[in-house]
Amino acid sequence: MMRLGWAVLACVGLLALGCQSKEVVDAPAADGSVTVTGKLVSVKDDRPADGGVDLTVETSNGKRETLRVGSSFIAGPRDAILALHQVVDAAKVGDRLKASGKRDESGAITVEHLEIVH
């Protein structure tokens, strides 16, 4: 009977782990970067004024995070920023996004990697 009790507890524990949301803010890495996954709720596109794009995502716990994708009007190599803008162009409000980067002084995340997740 004792074994059955432990087996039931182990199954319940595994089920609980499997049901955890993936829409979270990870703890900062050693280099200060963070990863955020959440649902896209708004887009502020300043590209027509030579600016960047601010994406607001909402994590499963209701916290809103600003993801800042810089301007493509920069000097030097632009391949990385243009790749981020391709993801921005493909994303729609309601899509789940996963982004990583470092927080700026305002608390927004300056995006270094961005993807749409399903």
Image (cartoon, rainbow, N blue to C red):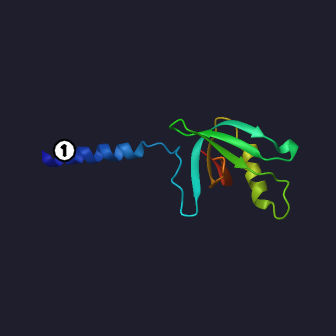
Badge 1 crowding class, 10 Å Cα cut-off, few under 14, some 14 to 19, many 20 or more, is: few
Q: Nearer the viewer, residue 81 or 67?
A: 67
Amino acid residing under circle 1:
Gly
Residue at horizontal 75%, vertical 38%?
Answer: 44
Label 1 secondary element: helix
Percent position (x, y) of residue 86?
A: 76, 50
Query: Which residue is rendered at x = 63% and y = 47% of the image?
Result: 107
Residue furthest left in the image: 1
Image mark count = 1
Q: Please state which of residues 1 and 44 is positioned toward the viewer in this rendering.
A: 44
Tell me which corner region of the image, top left, top right, bottom left or bottom right, holds residue 9: top left
Direction from residue 17 to residue 77 in the image, left or right: right
Q: Viewer-proximal residue, 21 or 74? A: 74
Q: Is residue 22 left or right of residue 2?
A: right
Residue indicated by mark 1 = 5
Measured as percent of width and height from the top left, residue 90 is found at 73, 44
Task: Give how far across and how far down residue 69 sits, in percent.
Answer: 73, 49
Residue at point 82% right, 53% down?
72
| Left or right of 11 in this view: 89 | right
Quadrant of the image containing the N terminus: top left
Vertical order, 111 against 1 (above or below): below
Location of the C terminus (image quadrant):
top right
Farthest residue, direction front: 105
